[in-house]
Amino acid sequence: MAVAPNKDLEFLPPQQSQSTPLGRQSIEKSTYLQLAILLGVALLIAALVYAFMVVMQNRSIQEQKNSGSSQIDNQTNQLSQIEQQSKQDQQRKNDVATINSALKSFFLKEKRLPDSLKELVPDYLAQMPTDPATQKEYSYKPSPDKKSWSVTAILSDGTTFKANGP
């Protein structure tokens, strides 16, 4: 059942609120101040985060450069070491060939083998070649019948380089 409105009640007009020229309600100064402080803090945090990210990015780039540089240095050192070993091995092979040639000359002229490589100096070799790394003499082994020989060098990789004569 519907109830009829009471005609004795009087309606009051709505209260007019204070408004700004734009029709907005006024905001207290303390609220503006709080918003300004909040905005300032947010900007400060954003600036700090940005600065942190820039520093970390620069550090990362520097580490990559350093690791790349150290890798290049390591590779250069490895290549340098390989190059040096290659040169030493080539020198060993040349020395063995030189000693073998001097032994052939000695054998043809003297009709015998020397008891040691020192007999080749100074007539057949100006000086006795030695291993470039160890400065030791190369291995010389005459055969039991004294008609042939072998001169041996140990290369950097542990393999043997040998020259036989005559």
Image: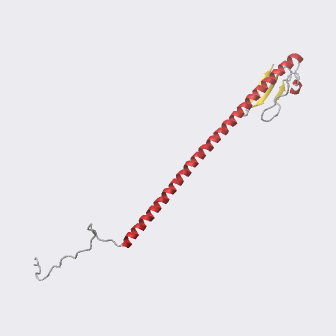
**Display colour scheme:** secondary structure
**Among the 4 quarters of the image, the one containing residue 30:** bottom left
User: Residue drawn 37% across and 69% down?
Assistant: 32
Vertical comparison of 6 with 128: above or below: below
Q: Which quarter of the rendering shows the N terminus?
A: bottom left
Query: What residue occupies the far front of the structure in this picture?
Result: 21
Residue 24 as seen in the image, left or right of residue 147: left
In depth, the one of 138 and 144 nearer the eye is 138
Vertical comparison of 149 with 28: above or below: above
In depth, the one of 57 and 130 nearer the eye is 57
Across and down, in percent, residue 7 comes to 10, 81
User: Residue drawn 87% across and 24% down?
Assistant: 120
Across and down, in percent, residue 40 comes to 44, 64
Query: What residue occupies the far bottom of the structure in this picture?
Result: 8
Across and down, in percent, residue 158 comes to 73, 34
Q: Which quarter of the rendering shows the C terminus?
A: top right
In depth, the one of 46 and 115 nearer the eye is 46
**Among the 4 quarters of the image, the one containing residue 36:** bottom left
**Across the whole image, how many numbered discs are drawn on residues?**
0
Residue 69 as seen in the image, left or right of residue 101: left
Across and down, in percent, residue 3 comes to 11, 78
